[in-house]
Image (spheres, rainbow, N blue to C red):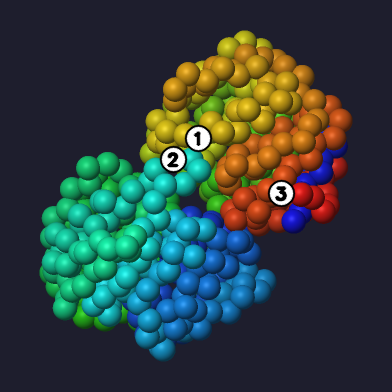
Amino acid sequence: MQKIVIRGGARLAGEVRVSGSKNAALPILASSLLASGKSIYRNVPALGDVRTMGRLLGRLGAGFSEVTKGIAHVDTASVSEFEAPYDLVKTMRASVLVLGPLVARHGRARVSLPGGCAIGARPIDQHLKGLAAMGARIDLENGYVNARARRLRGATIVFDMVTVTGTENLMMAAALARGRTTLENAAREPEVEELGRVLNKMGAKVRGAGTSLVTVEGVEELQPVEHAIIPDRIEAGTLLVAAAITRGDVLVRDCLPEHLEAVIAKLRATGAEVRAEGDGIRVRGKSEFKPADIATQPFPGFPTDMQAQFMVLMTRARGQSVLAETIFENRYMHVPELQRMGADIVVDGRTAVVRGPTKLTGATVMATDLRASACLVLAGLIAEGKTDILRIYHLDRGYDRLDKKLRALGADVRRARGSL
């Protein structure tokens, strides 16, 4: 087991490149199941979650190459199994994304229910409601979803709530369904738009991906594809905050400003200098920060995946900041760890009040989920003394070599053997 050790106080400076998007890569890898043959994906991040998806595809009978220099090969010609077992789904909820493709192309799927996770319950009832509307027979038994359909048929599906993976699963299912499928109140995230782009390259007829109304005209078959994944907007946002809180001067390359408008707006509201430059965004931190209030929202609002990182910045702001978490009911588990480092944060339900500026001091802390781990890394960058972060496997699930990227910008960060 490894830990990350950080000695705080360094000012970040230089250039850094953003890796491919985890949340785009996972559904795109799952979409390979819709066709028979070899697909090639570029700019794929070398992450724990990507490796888990690769193991799942392998369990289904597909050939999956380890990501090498950002390239992954998937060969689906020999898919012969249709079960996503509990031992894989429990480690990565995105495993449920094979449900739609398997039912659409092979007529059946057996997928473990993901249940809840550390940041709150994330049920798949909207996925199942949509598949049932498209003619699938759904049975729940022994913790698994069994879905069968001779061929799915188009339907009009209105999501009761915005769901990214639900939108993606049903877009993939609809691509091979008979007739037209309409998805209303669909998720608008860039990763959904990216999946629609890939499906169309495979021969699908998807319109409106990235808007709240998506229509899909089903086709008889799809073809393998070659595609380069978009940059990871959450990694980019994390690096922007890292530059700001260390009062640094960093050019974050290979990121798309249009995917980060809400984050950029809040960074500017705190006093940080943020501007587009070439193929990236430059951030210059200031000596003092102003407080800001944030409410997480589905895209294009402020992303829940940036809430924990922004909370660290708020410990540097002079005054009171209020953060409201509207997406997940249990996404403040990083707060006790920040409090141990000296942060003045009070949580009441889904609202957190941060008072600053406070001086953080190094401590031994424990990551509880993916974005909490990034938050603790950022806190370590500005803390006085040494910070030891345990359970960094959470970090490696979603950040491609973040410690190395920060070290290249001047941070004193390294990996070491640790407990837990």
Q: Is residue 218 left or right of residue 88?
A: left
Residue for badge 3? 420
Q: Cβ–Cβ below 8 Å for labels 1 and 3?
A: no
x, y percent for residue 308? 58, 34
Ranked by sequence position, the earlier of labels 2 and 3 is: 2
For mark 2, does the 10 Å Cα neighbourhood hold few (<14), some (14 to 19), or many (20 or more) residues? few
Instruction: Give the distance between the C-alpha atoms of the residues marked 2 and 1, in whole angstroms.
Output: 7 Å
Query: In this rendering, which labeled residue sits more in front, label 2 or label 3?
Result: 3
Label 2 sits on what residue type? Gly
- Front residue of this view, candidates 393 and 371: 393
Label 1 sits on what residue type? Arg
Q: Residue at x 86, y 30 (%)?
A: 385
Q: Cβ–Cβ below 8 Å for labels 2 and 1?
A: yes
Label tally: 3
Residue for badge 1? 331
Residue for badge 2? 120
Q: Cβ–Cβ below 8 Å for labels 2 and 3?
A: no
For mark 3, does the 10 Å Cα neighbourhood hold few (<14), some (14 to 19), or many (20 or more) residues? few
Q: Is residue 130 left or right of residue 372?
A: left
x, y percent for residue 268? 58, 26
Q: Secondary structure at mark 2?
A: strand
The N terminus, quarter of image: bottom right
